[in-house]
Amino acid sequence: MKSFRRFIDKIKPHFSKGGKFEMLHSTFEAFESFLFVSNQVTTKGAHIRDALDMKRAMSVVVAATVPALLFGMWNTGYQHNLSVGLEVTLWENFVFGFLKVFPIIVVSYVVGLGIEFAVAQIRGHEVNEGFLVSGILIPLIIPVDVPLWMVALATAFAVIIGKEVFGGTGMNILNPALTARAFLFFAYPSWMSGDTVWIEGLTKGQGVIDGFSGATPLANAAAGMFEKIPSVWEMFLGTIPGSIGETSVIAILIGAVILVATGMGSWKIMFSMIAGGLVMGLLFNAFAVNPYMEISAWHHLIMGGFAFGAVFMATDPVTAAQTERGKWIYGFLTGFLAILIRVINPAYPEGVMLAILLMNVFAPLIDHYVIEANIKKRVKRIKS
Amino acid sequence: MNDREPLFSSKNMKLLTNPLNIDNPITVQVLGVCSALAITVKLEPSVVMAISVVVVLAVSNVVISALRKMIPPRIRIIVQLTVIATMVILVDQVLKAFAYDVSKQLSVFVGLIITNCIIMGRLEAFAMGNRPWPAFLDGIGNSAGYGLILVIVGLLRELLGSGEIWGYPILEKLGVYNIGYENNGLMILPPMALIIIGVIIWVQRSRTKELIEES
């Protein structure tokens, strides 16, 4: 380790101002602070210091996604072997899924980080760790069968159009991972919905056993085949077809506990989003003019991407509402709209992605009015 | 303006060339974006739309410029609208007679040239205060600048969204579908046209020094 540090120090002058590789300064900077903790600290003024920098924050979120990721890998193998009628061990399922999911993760990271580094280089910024989380979230929210070049294209679109044009990490209006998914959803709809893309091998028409359907619970519900919706336990555990990381509510809950315990994700948003979903579900139950509206409200919470969206997507600190009261409103409306889109709009079996993106756009407005209201309240207090 | 100024003086040529780049109606003045999003799904309607706007704007500019001293200022807008509407109806009838398919594709948007902000904007800002010849050049220049963006967007959207150029299935002939390529459905939707125009503005602004805003 010491010698490595010495090596870094030795080559450092080349990358500093006036050095041979000055233009690669931000790349060097990124690797140095990635390998060693950055020793650049603010020197002037009084600060409350904390070891929590962006890298730490991002690492915690990545760690929180690990249960969902591991389960997703296993489930990929499990669903595939279920579709072809093979009985294999847990480990074999996992390895199969790992080999399918890992390339997607690699593509997502290579493309995303490549663009981040290039942009930082061109602009003379330091490389931001912002993509570390998006890079793992993108594979988790897409079907396993999406071709890799589409993943690469969607990632590039999300990073460039969704993030860099607004000024990079922290300046984006829309959640980058969901931007990538939305891009795929509208650009290549046949790869993002239907009943074959969720399970590896089905799109290529590999031998499927009789009576097997790769449709997600939501697709079944939208098609009116309510008897085909898996049992509550299956949906809670996650042994159902779906996007790689979204199926298992248990794995997501573990992630939620990590996020809330470390203060990375706002429990207010998660809680209010679930409340919003429940309220909308109960409203539908109350009217119940068609069979879809009769699905009990809490069923909606464990179907599709609701849990994943509530825990990992809506809580994105950049794109969510910033004010504490705003978070309640933001979360509630996200859940409310997600179930509304899901049940009412036949074109979109799942509404969580669109609901979160829509509320991302409204988050600054919510914040604005929360702050205005607070100012008004305080002005009133002074005057009285 | 001097009577003896040559027809293609550098000042007059500027009227023609500026709108193509540093004074582009769509990317710099940000006018006429609505129709640029709506009709650029394919190249052919984009080109037809561009030509229609060239005709309407050039002729209206000349007419309004010739009449400019006779038009009472208080009713100038309605006079301008009458001239534009006449031209648009003419263009619409010609399209229906000679290019019926494209005319159907463009549907209501030919009629909506009347409300295209570029045309009103040029009549009001230029033709009302200049002689017919510069007004003609200004009309051609601005509508060509509009048309240029339309053609770029239309070409990209047709190529990436449908895999064709002017209806010719170029990507299929090249065989890219066999290696797993697929058409991008987002390109066909209007939001992508807005993103493409945004990217064009981005590229143009970063290449043209005059347009870089002080921050």
Image (cartoon, helix red, strand yellow):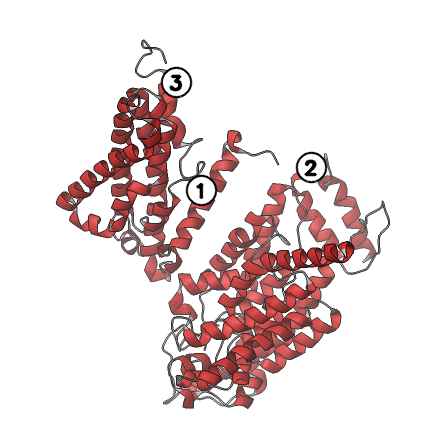
Residue A137 place in picture, x, y as percent: 58, 66
**Left or right: A164 in relation to B173:** right
Q: Is residue A185 above or below residue A219?
A: above
Q: Is residue A247 visible?
A: no
Query: Which chain's residue wears label 1?
Result: B
Q: Nearer the viewer, residue A370 or A309?
A: A370
Dot 3 crowding, Cα within 10 Å, few <14, some 14–19, many 20+: few
**Left or right: A170 in relation to B58:** right
Instruction: Classify residue B212 by image quadrant.
Output: top right
Whichever of labels 3 and 1 marks the residue nearer the N terminus, that label is 3
Query: Which chain's residue wears label 2?
Result: A
**Left or right: A11 in relation to B121:** right
Q: Is residue A1 above or below residue A344?
A: above
Query: Of all residues shown, which one is farthest toward the right?
Result: A46
- Residue position marked by numbered label 1 in the rendering: B200
Query: Of all residues shown, which one is farthest toward the left?
Result: B97
- Residue position marked by numbered label 2 in the rendering: A20
- Secondary structure at numbered mark 2: loop
Query: Of all residues shown, which one is farthest toward the front?
Result: A384
Disc tally is 3
Dot 1 crowding, Cα within 10 Å, few <14, some 14–19, many 20+: some
Residue, x 54% and y 58% (percent of image)? A361
- Residue position marked by numbered label 3 in the rendering: B11
Q: Is residue A343 above or below residue A296?
A: above
Residue A265 place in picture, x, y as percent: 68, 68
Q: Nearer the viewer, residue A32 or B141?
A: B141
Q: Quadrant of the C terminus of chain A?
A: bottom right
**Left or right: B70 in relation to A206:** left
